[in-house]
Image (cartoon, rainbow, N blue to C red):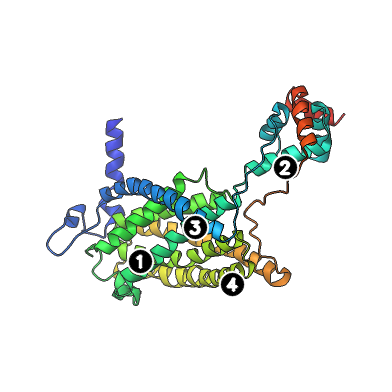
Amino acid sequence: MAHILKTLNSWFWWENIWMPINVTWAHFVDREGLVFPKPHQLYATIPYAFVLLIIRFLSERYIAIPLAKALGIKNVRRVKPQPNPVLESYFRECSKHPSQSEIQGLAKKCNCTVHLVEKWFRRRRNLEIPTVLRKFQEAFWRFSFYLTSSIAGFIFLYDKPWFYDIWQTWVGYPFQTLLPSQYWYYMAEISFYWSLLFTLGIDNKRKDFMAHVVHHLAAIGLMSGSWCGNYVRLGTLVIFVHDTADFWLEAAKMFNYARWEKTCNVLFIIFSIAFFITRIILFPCWILRATLYQPTYYSTTPVIAYFLFNGQLLILQGLHLYWGYLIFKILRRFIFLKDLKDDRSDEEEEDSVTDNEEESTKNGSKNGCGSSKHLLNSSHQ
């Protein structure tokens, strides 16, 4: 096993994958006037991610919650449905949205009314939907990071020649020294996406959940790979192009949760404009042009990393087009129907039940037994 791992490691770090012709890892030893990124430095992004999680917890608790209250968002306590083994089994194993005939069969088995079974499922579904306050906290954290990253990125890049002339990203490659600002910019971004992966299970789940998973993994892989291959100049531009639109979206979400409709609408329109400029125009015409075309100008023999990195960048662009389509649908509905609703999130259902109904459900649960499959069969008879 050790021999296999050693062989795989040597294959992974083979110079022909990462480096131009006649360049080896030995050339990337720090020397006077030159400091190079080192793969082992990426290990630090894991503990940094946990530091960001601590910062997130503190900011959500001591800044986001008071801000939410100031904006009129209340911490609504969810009413849990009474324990009912039959309904819980059906909810987990069969369907969270049973049909009317299935509800009638469940009501008969539990010895309660159809209305109470509907209420039970409504409450049970609501338990799996984050509260408005929880959504606000998540949006606040992302807004804070993306805004901070955008400001820091502009400060780091505004005086760099490759910010204005992207051809400069390849001048002197691969022997381009690593700047302290580039180091921290990369560490913060990679750590942030690690932290998002760590909290995917508890964050607000949307219909494009898998797209987010792919995006986060592609982002980490792309940034890590560009770090190892010293494509840092281009990498910082990619990061900046992405973050400058995202904080507008998170700000729009925050005001949407606070029901500041006009403010939310304005912010979403600004986000849409920023998204289409940065992701649909700048990214393919500026970034992808620099990664697909310009390397062939400096070398007629592209390394394997050329195809790996551009493959990941094209995956990102595919996600941009997918999200652009969703944004266009929302904008179209807003323009023609004046409805600015995000279809990716589940809405909490209205819930009300009297004390007598609650007691009936509780008593009915004592009579509920048997498998959910038997209930389905009996409901159709």
Q: Which of marks 3 and 1 is in front?
A: 3
Task: Give the mark nearer the N terminus: 3 vs 4.
Answer: 3
Within 10 angstroms of label 3, few (less than 14), some, or many (20 or more) residues? many
The residue where tag 4 is placed is 266
Q: In which quarter of the image is the C terminus?
A: top right
Q: In which quarter of the image is the N terminus?
A: top left
Residues at marks 3 and 1, CA–CA distance in whole angstroms: 18 Å
Mark 2 belongs to which amino acid? Arg
Task: Give the mark nearer the N terminus: 2 vs 4.
Answer: 2
Q: What element carries label 4?
A: helix
Q: Do the residues labelled 3 and 1 touch (CB within 8 Å)?
A: no
Q: Do the residues labelled 4 and 1 touch (CB within 8 Å)?
A: no
Mark 3 belongs to which amino acid? Phe
The residue where tag 1 is placed is 152
Q: Residue at x 45, y 50 (%)?
A: 196
Disc ID at residue 122: 2
The residue where tag 3 is placed is 140
Furthest-bottom residue in view? Answer: 164
| Residue 221 visible from this viewpoint | no
Q: What element carries label 1?
A: helix
Q: Do the residues labelled 2 and 1 touch (CB within 8 Å)?
A: no
Query: Where is 354 relative to 302, above or below?
Result: above
Residues at marks 2 and 1, CA–CA distance in whole angstroms: 45 Å
Q: What element carries label 2?
A: helix
| Residue 124 at x, y percent in the picture | 68, 39
Q: Do the residues labelled 2 and 4 touch (CB within 8 Å)?
A: no
Residues at marks 4 and 1, CA–CA distance in whole angstroms: 25 Å
